[in-house]
Amino acid sequence: MSVLTIREAQADDLEAIIRLHEEDEMGQHGDAWLPETKPAYEAAFAAIRRSPENRLFVAVDGSEIVGTFQLTFIPNLTGRGALRVKVESVKVKAARRSAGIGARMMAFAEEHARAQGARAMELTSNKVRKDAHRFYERLGFSRSHEGFKKKL
Amino acid sequence: MSVLTIREAQADDLEAIIRLHEEDEMGQHGDAWLPETKPAYEAAFAAIRRSPENRLFVAVDGSEIVGTFQLTFIPNLTGRGALRVKVESVKVKAARRSAGIGARMMAFAEEHARAQGARAMELTSNKVRKDAHRFYERLGFSRSHEGFKKKL
Protein backbone atom coordinates (compact mmCIF):
# COMPACT_ATOMS: atom_id res chain seq x y z
CA MET A 1 0.00 0.00 0.00
CA SER A 2 2.87 2.38 0.63
CA VAL A 3 3.60 2.64 -3.09
CA LEU A 4 -0.02 3.17 -4.19
CA THR A 5 -0.21 5.96 -6.72
CA ILE A 6 -3.27 7.46 -8.36
CA ARG A 7 -2.91 8.88 -11.84
CA GLU A 8 -4.97 9.57 -14.94
CA ALA A 9 -5.62 6.44 -17.01
CA GLN A 10 -3.72 5.92 -20.27
CA ALA A 11 -4.81 3.92 -23.30
CA ASP A 12 -2.47 1.08 -22.25
CA ASP A 13 -4.43 0.70 -19.00
CA LEU A 14 -7.74 -0.04 -20.68
CA GLU A 15 -7.67 -3.85 -20.55
CA ALA A 16 -6.69 -3.83 -16.85
CA ILE A 17 -9.51 -1.37 -16.10
CA ILE A 18 -12.10 -3.51 -17.84
CA ARG A 19 -10.78 -6.58 -15.95
CA LEU A 20 -11.75 -4.72 -12.75
CA HIS A 21 -15.22 -4.16 -14.20
CA GLU A 22 -15.44 -7.88 -15.05
CA GLU A 23 -15.12 -8.72 -11.37
CA ASP A 24 -18.24 -6.69 -10.58
CA GLU A 25 -21.08 -9.21 -10.49
CA MET A 26 -23.42 -7.07 -8.36
CA GLY A 27 -23.71 -4.33 -10.94
CA GLN A 28 -24.80 -6.76 -13.69
CA HIS A 29 -23.49 -4.48 -16.41
CA GLY A 30 -22.14 -7.39 -18.47
CA ASP A 31 -18.66 -5.97 -18.73
CA ALA A 32 -16.01 -8.23 -20.27
CA TRP A 33 -12.84 -7.64 -22.26
CA LEU A 34 -13.46 -9.59 -25.47
CA PRO A 35 -12.54 -9.09 -29.12
CA GLU A 36 -16.14 -8.05 -29.82
CA THR A 37 -16.41 -5.61 -26.90
CA LYS A 38 -12.95 -4.02 -27.19
CA PRO A 39 -13.91 -1.46 -29.88
CA ALA A 40 -16.77 -0.09 -27.76
CA TYR A 41 -14.47 0.29 -24.75
CA GLU A 42 -11.83 1.99 -26.87
CA ALA A 43 -14.40 4.40 -28.26
CA ALA A 44 -15.73 5.20 -24.77
CA PHE A 45 -12.18 5.67 -23.48
CA ALA A 46 -11.43 8.09 -26.32
CA ALA A 47 -14.66 9.99 -25.57
CA ILE A 48 -13.67 10.32 -21.91
CA ARG A 49 -10.21 11.57 -22.89
CA ARG A 50 -11.69 14.11 -25.31
CA SER A 51 -14.14 15.43 -22.74
CA PRO A 52 -13.02 18.51 -20.82
CA GLU A 53 -15.34 17.51 -17.98
CA ASN A 54 -14.45 13.86 -17.53
CA ARG A 55 -11.32 12.28 -16.09
CA LEU A 56 -10.66 8.59 -15.64
CA PHE A 57 -8.18 7.54 -12.95
CA VAL A 58 -6.38 4.38 -11.93
CA ALA A 59 -4.82 3.37 -8.61
CA VAL A 60 -1.52 1.57 -9.24
CA ASP A 61 0.48 -0.54 -6.81
CA GLY A 62 3.91 -1.06 -8.35
CA SER A 63 2.92 -1.96 -11.91
CA GLU A 64 -0.47 -3.48 -11.00
CA ILE A 65 -3.71 -1.59 -11.56
CA VAL A 66 -5.75 -2.23 -8.43
CA GLY A 67 -8.51 0.37 -8.70
CA THR A 68 -10.26 2.83 -10.96
CA PHE A 69 -12.83 5.61 -10.85
CA GLN A 70 -14.14 8.38 -13.08
CA LEU A 71 -14.91 11.99 -12.21
CA THR A 72 -17.49 14.00 -14.13
CA PHE A 73 -17.56 17.76 -13.49
CA ILE A 74 -21.06 19.11 -13.97
CA PRO A 75 -21.68 22.84 -14.35
CA ASN A 76 -25.08 23.49 -12.86
CA LEU A 77 -27.40 26.31 -11.76
CA THR A 78 -28.76 24.62 -8.63
CA GLY A 79 -27.21 25.77 -5.34
CA ARG A 80 -26.33 29.23 -6.65
CA GLY A 81 -24.33 27.85 -9.54
CA ALA A 82 -22.31 25.33 -7.54
CA LEU A 83 -20.02 23.16 -9.64
CA ARG A 84 -20.55 19.53 -8.70
CA VAL A 85 -18.55 16.38 -9.29
CA LYS A 86 -20.06 12.98 -9.90
CA VAL A 87 -17.99 9.94 -9.04
CA GLU A 88 -18.57 7.05 -11.41
CA SER A 89 -17.51 3.45 -11.88
CA VAL A 90 -15.56 3.03 -8.64
CA LYS A 91 -13.89 -0.38 -8.73
CA VAL A 92 -11.24 -2.03 -6.54
CA LYS A 93 -9.59 -5.31 -7.53
CA ALA A 94 -11.42 -8.12 -5.68
CA ALA A 95 -8.27 -9.60 -4.13
CA ARG A 96 -7.27 -6.19 -2.78
CA ARG A 97 -10.50 -5.01 -1.18
CA SER A 98 -10.87 -3.84 2.45
CA ALA A 99 -7.27 -2.61 2.44
CA GLY A 100 -7.87 1.11 2.15
CA ILE A 101 -7.54 1.47 -1.62
CA GLY A 102 -11.12 2.73 -2.01
CA ALA A 103 -10.62 5.28 0.75
CA ARG A 104 -7.40 6.49 -0.88
CA MET A 105 -9.16 6.87 -4.21
CA MET A 106 -12.06 8.78 -2.69
CA ALA A 107 -9.71 11.08 -0.77
CA PHE A 108 -7.89 11.79 -4.04
CA ALA A 109 -11.22 12.42 -5.78
CA GLU A 110 -12.30 14.87 -3.10
CA GLU A 111 -9.01 16.74 -3.16
CA HIS A 112 -9.12 16.95 -6.95
CA ALA A 113 -12.73 18.15 -6.87
CA ARG A 114 -11.92 20.88 -4.34
CA ALA A 115 -8.89 21.97 -6.37
CA GLN A 116 -11.16 22.44 -9.39
CA GLY A 117 -13.57 24.58 -7.37
CA ALA A 118 -16.32 22.02 -6.93
CA ARG A 119 -18.66 22.58 -4.01
CA ALA A 120 -20.39 19.22 -3.93
CA MET A 121 -19.68 15.58 -4.73
CA GLU A 122 -22.24 12.96 -5.56
CA LEU A 123 -22.51 9.34 -6.57
CA THR A 124 -25.06 6.58 -6.79
CA SER A 125 -24.62 3.03 -5.58
CA ASN A 126 -26.82 0.03 -6.35
CA LYS A 127 -29.15 -0.69 -3.44
CA VAL A 128 -27.69 -4.21 -3.12
CA ARG A 129 -24.21 -2.85 -2.28
CA LYS A 130 -24.72 -2.54 1.48
CA ASP A 131 -20.99 -2.53 2.27
CA ALA A 132 -20.42 0.30 -0.19
CA HIS A 133 -23.17 2.35 1.44
CA ARG A 134 -21.53 2.09 4.85
CA PHE A 135 -18.20 2.98 3.25
CA TYR A 136 -19.56 6.17 1.66
CA GLU A 137 -21.34 7.18 4.86
CA ARG A 138 -18.08 6.76 6.80
CA LEU A 139 -16.50 9.18 4.30
CA GLY A 140 -19.10 11.83 5.13
CA PHE A 141 -21.55 11.25 2.30
CA SER A 142 -25.24 11.63 3.11
CA ARG A 143 -27.63 9.04 1.67
CA SER A 144 -30.17 11.74 0.90
CA HIS A 145 -31.44 10.78 -2.54
CA GLU A 146 -33.07 7.98 -4.47
CA GLY A 147 -31.18 6.97 -7.61
CA PHE A 148 -33.31 6.19 -10.68
CA LYS A 149 -32.12 4.46 -13.85
CA LYS A 150 -33.78 3.67 -17.15
CA LYS A 151 -32.29 1.70 -19.99
CA LEU A 152 -32.95 3.09 -23.46
CA MET B 1 -50.63 22.95 -22.88
CA SER B 2 -51.17 22.68 -26.63
CA VAL B 3 -48.60 25.38 -27.30
CA LEU B 4 -45.94 24.04 -24.93
CA THR B 5 -42.57 24.10 -26.61
CA ILE B 6 -39.26 22.83 -25.31
CA ARG B 7 -36.08 24.51 -26.48
CA GLU B 8 -32.55 25.15 -25.36
CA ALA B 9 -32.27 27.94 -22.78
CA GLN B 10 -30.93 31.35 -23.84
CA ALA B 11 -29.19 33.92 -21.67
CA ASP B 12 -32.41 35.98 -21.55
CA ASP B 13 -34.18 33.05 -19.86
CA LEU B 14 -31.86 32.93 -16.87
CA GLU B 15 -33.90 34.98 -14.41
CA ALA B 16 -37.08 33.02 -15.17
CA ILE B 17 -35.18 29.73 -14.72
CA ILE B 18 -33.83 30.79 -11.34
CA ARG B 19 -37.35 31.89 -10.31
CA LEU B 20 -38.39 28.25 -10.84
CA HIS B 21 -35.52 27.18 -8.59
CA GLU B 22 -36.66 29.70 -5.96
CA GLU B 23 -39.97 27.88 -5.69
CA ASP B 24 -38.18 24.68 -4.70
CA GLU B 25 -38.30 24.60 -0.91
CA MET B 26 -37.78 20.85 -0.55
CA GLY B 27 -34.35 20.88 -2.12
CA GLN B 28 -33.04 23.51 0.32
CA HIS B 29 -30.44 24.69 -2.16
CA GLY B 30 -30.93 28.34 -1.22
CA ASP B 31 -31.56 29.47 -4.77
CA ALA B 32 -32.68 33.08 -5.26
CA TRP B 33 -32.28 35.64 -8.01
CA LEU B 34 -30.57 38.55 -6.22
CA PRO B 35 -27.98 41.15 -7.22
CA GLU B 36 -25.38 39.25 -5.20
CA THR B 37 -26.24 35.81 -6.64
CA LYS B 38 -26.72 36.85 -10.27
CA PRO B 39 -23.01 36.73 -11.24
CA ALA B 40 -22.67 33.12 -10.01
CA TYR B 41 -25.72 32.06 -12.01
CA GLU B 42 -24.43 33.86 -15.10
CA ALA B 43 -21.06 32.14 -14.76
CA ALA B 44 -22.71 28.72 -14.32
CA PHE B 45 -24.98 29.37 -17.30
CA ALA B 46 -21.96 30.28 -19.43
CA ALA B 47 -20.16 27.11 -18.29
CA ILE B 48 -23.17 25.00 -19.28
CA ARG B 49 -23.32 26.67 -22.70
CA ARG B 50 -19.59 26.13 -23.25
CA SER B 51 -19.78 22.47 -22.30
CA PRO B 52 -20.17 20.05 -25.20
CA GLU B 53 -21.79 17.55 -22.83
CA ASN B 54 -24.35 19.73 -21.07
CA ARG B 55 -27.57 21.21 -22.40
CA LEU B 56 -30.05 23.30 -20.45
CA PHE B 57 -33.67 23.34 -21.63
CA VAL B 58 -36.79 25.32 -20.90
CA ALA B 59 -40.46 24.48 -21.43
CA VAL B 60 -42.32 27.53 -22.71
CA ASP B 61 -46.06 28.13 -22.84
CA GLY B 62 -46.65 31.15 -25.05
CA SER B 63 -44.02 33.50 -23.68
CA GLU B 64 -43.97 32.05 -20.16
CA ILE B 65 -41.21 29.75 -18.97
CA VAL B 66 -42.98 27.01 -17.04
CA GLY B 67 -40.28 24.37 -16.68
CA THR B 68 -36.59 23.61 -16.97
CA PHE B 69 -34.18 20.69 -16.90
CA GLN B 70 -30.55 19.99 -17.73
CA LEU B 71 -29.06 17.01 -19.54
CA THR B 72 -25.50 15.86 -18.93
CA PHE B 73 -24.06 13.31 -21.37
CA ILE B 74 -21.51 11.11 -19.63
CA PRO B 75 -19.08 9.01 -21.66
CA ASN B 76 -18.40 5.95 -19.55
CA LEU B 77 -16.80 2.48 -19.70
CA THR B 78 -19.40 0.68 -17.57
CA GLY B 79 -21.95 -1.36 -19.50
CA ARG B 80 -19.65 -1.98 -22.48
CA GLY B 81 -19.04 1.69 -23.00
CA ALA B 82 -22.67 2.77 -22.88
CA LEU B 83 -23.18 6.52 -23.16
CA ARG B 84 -25.47 7.66 -20.36
CA VAL B 85 -27.48 10.80 -19.76
CA LYS B 86 -28.04 12.34 -16.36
CA VAL B 87 -31.13 14.51 -15.91
CA GLU B 88 -30.54 17.40 -13.52
CA SER B 89 -32.48 20.24 -11.95
CA VAL B 90 -35.94 19.30 -13.16
CA LYS B 91 -38.31 22.10 -12.16
CA VAL B 92 -41.91 22.89 -13.08
CA LYS B 93 -43.54 26.20 -12.13
CA ALA B 94 -45.51 25.64 -8.91
CA ALA B 95 -48.76 27.02 -10.31
CA ARG B 96 -48.52 24.70 -13.33
CA ARG B 97 -47.74 21.37 -11.69
CA SER B 98 -49.70 18.15 -12.24
CA ALA B 99 -50.64 19.26 -15.74
CA GLY B 100 -48.30 17.06 -17.76
CA ILE B 101 -45.44 19.54 -18.20
CA GLY B 102 -42.96 17.30 -16.36
CA ALA B 103 -43.98 14.30 -18.43
CA ARG B 104 -43.56 16.31 -21.64
CA MET B 105 -40.09 17.44 -20.53
CA MET B 106 -39.02 13.92 -19.65
CA ALA B 107 -40.33 12.54 -22.95
CA PHE B 108 -38.32 15.22 -24.75
CA ALA B 109 -35.25 14.35 -22.66
CA GLU B 110 -35.56 10.67 -23.50
CA GLU B 111 -36.01 11.33 -27.20
CA HIS B 112 -33.02 13.66 -27.23
CA ALA B 113 -30.91 11.13 -25.31
CA ARG B 114 -31.79 8.35 -27.77
CA ALA B 115 -31.03 10.59 -30.73
CA GLN B 116 -27.54 11.20 -29.31
CA GLY B 117 -26.96 7.47 -28.94
CA ALA B 118 -27.37 7.23 -25.18
CA ARG B 119 -28.26 3.79 -23.84
CA ALA B 120 -29.24 4.76 -20.31
CA MET B 121 -30.79 7.67 -18.43
CA GLU B 122 -30.37 8.38 -14.77
CA LEU B 123 -31.30 10.93 -12.16
CA THR B 124 -31.42 11.34 -8.42
CA SER B 125 -34.30 12.74 -6.41
CA ASN B 126 -34.27 13.82 -2.77
CA LYS B 127 -35.80 11.13 -0.57
CA VAL B 128 -38.44 13.61 0.66
CA ARG B 129 -39.90 14.05 -2.85
CA LYS B 130 -42.32 11.12 -2.70
CA ASP B 131 -44.52 12.46 -5.51
CA ALA B 132 -41.51 12.80 -7.79
CA HIS B 133 -40.51 9.19 -7.10
CA ARG B 134 -43.92 7.92 -8.19
CA PHE B 135 -43.70 10.14 -11.26
CA TYR B 136 -40.34 8.71 -12.34
CA GLU B 137 -41.47 5.14 -11.70
CA ARG B 138 -44.54 5.74 -13.89
CA LEU B 139 -42.14 6.84 -16.64
CA GLY B 140 -40.30 3.52 -16.46
CA PHE B 141 -37.41 4.47 -14.22
CA SER B 142 -36.23 1.89 -11.72
CA ARG B 143 -35.41 3.09 -8.21
CA SER B 144 -32.37 0.81 -8.09
CA HIS B 145 -29.73 3.00 -6.46
CA GLU B 146 -28.99 5.02 -3.37
CA GLY B 147 -27.95 8.60 -4.07
CA PHE B 148 -25.13 10.00 -1.94
CA LYS B 149 -24.12 13.66 -1.66
CA LYS B 150 -21.34 15.45 0.15
CA LYS B 151 -20.86 19.20 0.37
CA LEU B 152 -17.26 20.37 -0.03
Image (cartoon, coloured by chain):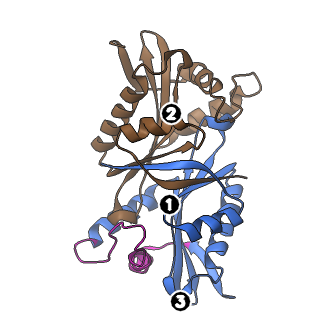
Chain colours: A blue, B brown
Q: Is residue A34 located in the magenta-colored stretch of the structure?
A: yes
Point out residue B144 in the picture as x, y percentages from the top left corner.
45, 55
Quadrant of image for the N terminus of chain B: top left
Q: Which residue is mark 1?
A: A127
Please tell me whether residue A20 is drawn above or below residue B39 in the rendered image.
Answer: below
Q: CA distance from mark 2 to mark 1?
A: 20 Å
Height in image: A60 above or below B19? below
Is residue B82 magenta-colored?
no
Q: Secondary structure at mark 1?
A: loop
Question: Which is more foreground, mark 3 or mark 2?
Answer: 2
B128 shown above or below A73: above
How far, Cα to Cα, is label 3 from label 1? 33 Å
Q: Where A39 sits versus B106, above or below?
A: below
Labels 2 and 1 in the same subunit: no
Q: Amino acid at mark 3?
A: Ser
Q: Chain of mark 1?
A: A
A42 or B67, which lies in front?
A: B67
Q: Is residue A56 left or right of residue A43?
A: right
Q: Secondary structure at mark 3?
A: loop
Res B12 quadrant in image: top right
* Residue A115, picture quadrant: bottom right
Which residue is disc 3 drawn over? A63
User: Which residue is painted at 39% across and 22% down in the image?
Assistant: B100
In the rendered structure, which segment of residues is drawn in magenta?
A8-37
Left or right of B62? Residue A109 is: right
Q: Give the crowd class for mark 3: few <14, some 14-19, many >=20 residues within 10 Å.
A: few
Q: Which chain does the residue under circle 3 lie in? A: A
Label 2 marks a residue whose chain is: B
Q: Earlier in the sequence, mark 3 or mark 1?
A: 3
Which marked residue is nearer to the observer: mark 3 or mark 1?
1
Which residue was labeled with disc 2? B131
